[in-house]
Image: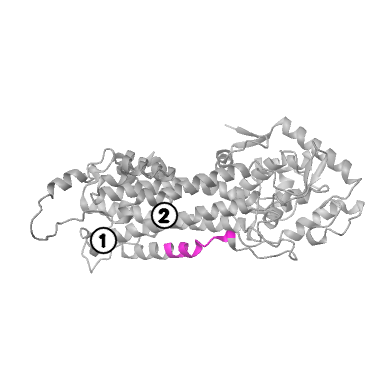
Amino acid sequence: MIQTITLTGSDLTIKEILSVVDNKDIKIEVHKDALTRVKQSRKFLDQQSAKQLIYGINTGFGPMAGHIIGKDQLSNLQRNLIVSHAVGMGEPILNSYVLAAMVVRLNTFLKGYSGVSVELTEQLKKFINHRIIPIVPEHGAVGTSGDLVQLSHIALAIIGEGEVIFNDKKQKVASVMAELNIKPYVLKPKEGLAFINGTSMMTAIAAILCDKADTLLRIVIHSGAWSMEIVNAFSDSVSEVLHNLRPHSGQIFVAKMMREVLSSSKLLQNRHEFNCENSSITDSTHQIQREVQDVYSLRCIPQILGPVKDALEKTKEIVGVEINSVTDNPIVDVNKKEFLHGGNFHGDYIAYAVDQLKMTIVKLTMLSERRINYFLNQKVNRRFPPFINLDTPGLSLALQGLQFVATSTTSQSQTLAFPQYVHSISTNADNQDIVSMGTDAALLTAKVLENAYIVITIELITLAQAVDFMKNSKDLSPKNGALYKGLRKVFPVIIKDRVIIEELRNSISFVKDEAKYAIN
């Protein structure tokens, strides 16, 4: 059944962007009031460009703004801008990111401040609804004057040049447009600049990352609770009273979620009961069999994951503002009859937000890796065989190899944790003398997020192996029990060493796509 999302320019949500990306049956419509604004903006621009000098319309760009362009060359100027900037290199950005960026850019146009024509919005809408996805290389954007290079590759396809993905195949856009009876678009004055002069690519990537990070965080909260169950951890580490005494919203959220998961657990250690059982105080110093406090990776989960939650919520807030903002230059203000020259295309808000999110995801990954080490290191846990070996230690190696993967992947993420936000390098003949690197920041966050999914998958495999050693799957809380059963469908218990390459791929797919249903 065909569903529609109507864009107004003012109320697009992250959820709606994701629905377009995830469901090919969802089509975009444009609100009639938005089209009225677009028409008025374009009419005003056409009237004024014949009377006055306006940057990017009848002048050159950047350091060449002092060059005045002849009336007969205005359209050619816009084409030159696109073809000269569609020069990205490297691997293609994910189709989902590109499609999301197209939706965000269209929504920006519909605010009525970009000076584009209704015809350009219609062309972009056709590409979205037919899922014609331009191929956009990863390298090229510095994140000021917007995502110039990446958005140029999208604009290039709109005018009928370059390559796209259509029906899951790489094709020349000209042949796809001919098949669908879509004519190449001829850019009008300012339309090339309006198309690429904004933060739509970095914002679109950030929107998708928010959803992926939200799912990841919930899974890691459950894995933390599951870890606590397996080792009979003390329940007071998630106490409501404890966390209300330090009322950071993220910390309280994580602790509450863990209490909900663990509410029916039969495996946690009650602090009061433990103290009563070990209350004999003698004249001599002596040692009891278990530690009075659990290690930090078990005891401090809400305190460590709380900042992840807070960073995620702040990123969502910033992305929500950005996708409904005017981010190009100059801005066509019909109401006040003027052109505003400024820097709304500067991507620092997104760069800063995704860098903060990235750093917290790296810490989340480190937390998961430390718990993997806890369970696999017999000298630390003092309850499981080496690498949770269920066969013959020494002859068989069980999860030893997987720990190397977790360690190396976490190490890479630690290197990537440095904020791209502060990596400004002056460019564009020093016109762009301080830049955001927002799109690179978003892409690096995507890499860190992908790494985190690898490490958490290894942790879940480790926890499932520990459950099979303990033979206590029936005692797990219902949600953790469901997580255990779901994982075991794609990754059976390891007793004899075997080739698990395909099982690992299936396990990552389970964690990314299905685990969230097991824990809901």
Q: Quadrant of the C terminus?
A: top left
Whether residue 95 can be seen here: no
Which label's residue is closer to the chain start, 2 or 1?
2
- Is 391 on the left or on the right of 124, as rendered? left
User: In the image, which is nearer the foreground, mark 2 or mark 1?
Assistant: 2
SS at badge 2: helix
Q: Residue flagged by tag 2: what amino acid is it? A: Leu
> Badge 2, how many Cα within 10 Å: few under 14, some, many 20+?
many
Q: Is residue 319 magenta?
A: no
Residues at marks 2 and 1 touching, judged by CB atoms closer than 8 Å: no
Residue 480, horizontal then vertical, whole percent: 31, 44
- What secondary structure predominates along the stretch shown in magenta? helix
In the current view of this chain or complex, which residue is farthest to the bottom? Answer: 394
> Badge 1, how many Cα within 10 Å: few under 14, some, many 20+?
few
Q: Which mark is residue 496?
A: 1
Q: Nearer the viewer, residue 46 or 388?
A: 46
Q: Which residue is mark 2?
A: 364
Relative to 47, residue 437 above or below: below
Q: Nearer the viewer, residue 182 or 104?
A: 104
Residue 7, horizontal then vertical, whole percent: 66, 35
For the point 37% across and 59% down, the residue is 369
Q: CA distance from mark 2 to mark 1?
A: 31 Å
The magenta span reads 410-421
For the point 61% across and 56% down, the residue is 439
Q: Residue flagged by tag 1: what amino acid is it? A: Lys
